Amino acid sequence: NFALLRRHWSHNEEGVLIAQNNVASCLGDLGRLDEALVLKREVFAKRLRNGDNEDVVIVGYNLADSLIKLKRYSEARKILQKQLLPLANRVVGPDNDATLRIMSHISVCLRKDQAPTRADVDEAARILQECIQRRRRVFGPTHPTTRIDEKLLAKTHQLLARMS
C-alpha cells in the first residue's frame, strides 16, 4: 500500500518517489489521467529539488506527456521548453533520444494548442526539421522515431498549406 510506504518509509525518499511514479503510471494506463497527473507533478517537483540529472528529464517528460494527453498543450509546452529542453541538453546532450523526444513534443504543443498562429506552426516545422536531422545522423533514416517525426513534419506542412 502506497500510503503505508509513505508513512513507514518516509526516510527512503527515493523508494517513495519510485513507488509514487509507478502508481502514477498505473493510473495513467487505467485512463485515470487526472489522478496520475497529480502524482506526476509531485514526483517532478521533488526530483527538481534533488538536482539536475537524467531522472528529472524522464519524470518531467512523463509529466509533459500526461499534459499533452489531457490536451493541456500550453502548460506542457512551458515545462518542455523552459525547463526540460535546457536541462536535457545539459544533462544527456542534444542528440540523446530524450532530448529529441522533448523537441518533438514541443512541436506537437505548438501545432495543437488552441488556434495556433502561422508563426507557431512555422516554429513547429523548424523544430521537427532539426530533430529529424539529428535523428537521421544518430539513429539512421529507418529508425522508428525518425519515421514518426517525419510523419509529424508532413502533418505540420499540411497545416501550413491550409493556413496559406
Image (cartoon, helix red, strand yellow):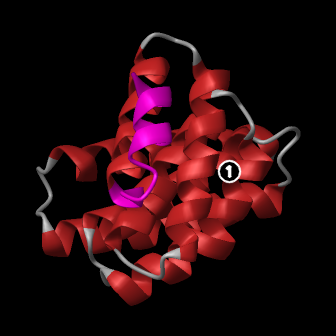
Q: Position of residue 155 (x, y in %)?
A: 53, 39
Name the residue: 57% across, 74% down: 49
Q: Position of residue 6 (x, y in %)?
A: 48, 40
Q: How many marks?
A: 1
* Residue 74 placement, left or right of 91: right
Q: Which residue is mark 1?
A: 76
Majority secondary structure in the magenta region: helix
* Residue 52 placement, left or right of 147: right
Q: Nearer the viewer, residue 114 or 133?
A: 114
Asked whether the viewer can see residue 157, the reply is no
Name the residue: 32% across, 50% down: 15
Say if 89 sits above or below 144 in the image: below
Q: Nearer the viewer, residue 113 or 42?
A: 42
* Residue 150 placement, left or right of 70: left
Question: Circle 1 sits in a helix, a strand or a loop, which is it?
Answer: helix
Name the residue: 32% across, 42% down: 148
Q: Is residue 11 magenta?
A: yes
